[in-house]
Amino acid sequence: MKIILTEGNEIVELRIYCRTSIKLQQPVVGFSIRNQRGLELISDNTYITYKDTMLPTILPGENFYASFKFMLPYLKPGNYTIGGAIADGVPGMHIQHHRRDEALNFKVHASHIIYGLFGVPIIALGLVPLLNQWGVIGFSPAFLNMSDFMASLFAAIAGLILIIDAFKATRL
């Protein structure tokens, strides 16, 4: 299988094909994506989707696959590997039957990511000038009142003012 990526920010589908020689009562299939240093950047498994549902038992000799469809973040240029695993049970009380860490290799040729290990796809972005009480672009003293922010970081560097407010997580 050939994977060609530019930077990420793409919806990808990863399928892990399995064949079992034993009975699996609570099958869990997982994957991980690692960088060229072996650091695990992304991982997930089927447990969270099926934790409240009774999955059918998979009998010896049966073939099946797990499909993961997700937004691949922006990745730094370099080599990456995708690994997969199959277990039976629930996290913390499972038996891992097979794991293959470097099942598939791919390479990112170009990216805008300079710092960090990867960049997240931004849903919305904007630069909005703020007007102070005189109608001039800038920060008003009321805006700089740090008590208005729950968890804020304030830095003034060479005339540049940076305010990072706490962010909220919203499930999509």
Image: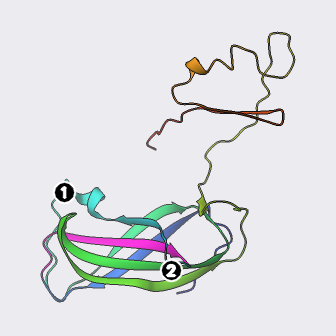
- Rendering quarter of residue 11: bottom right
Residue identified by numbered label 1: 53
Place of residue 133 in the rendered image (x, y in percent of width and height, measured from the top left): 80, 10
Q: Which mark is residue 131?
A: none
Under circle 1, the secondary element is loop
The magenta stretch spans which residues? Answer: 23-35
Q: Residue at x 64, y 77 (%)?
A: 78
Pick the front one: 79 or 55: 79
Place of residue 27 in the rendered image (x, y in percent of width and height, measured from the top left): 21, 72
Place of residue 32 in the rendered image (x, y in percent of width and height, measured from the top left): 42, 72
Color encoding of the figure: rainbow
Magenta stretch: helix, strand or loop mostly: strand
In the figure, is residue 159 to the left or right of 77?
Answer: right
In the figure, is residue 103 to the left or right of 63?
Answer: right
Residue identified by numbered label 2: 81
Amino acid type of the residue tagged 2 in the rendering: Thr
Q: Is residue 131 visible?
A: yes
Amino acid type of the residue tagged 1 in the rendering: Thr
- The residue carrying pointer 1 sits among few (fewer than 14), some (14 to 19) or many (20 or more) residues within 10 Å by Cα, namely few
Q: Residue at x 77, y 21 (%)?
A: 139
Q: Is residue 3 visible?
A: no
* Distance from Cα at disc 1 to Cα at disc 2: 31 Å
Pick the front one: 126 or 12: 126
In the figure, is residue 111 to the left or right of 172?
Answer: right
Q: Please tell me whether mark 1 or mark 2 is closer to you in this view.
A: 2
Place of residue 10 in the rendered image (x, y in percent of width and height, measured from the top left): 59, 63
Under circle 2, the secondary element is strand
Q: Is residue 49 above or below residue 139?
A: below
- Is residue 89 magenta-colored? no
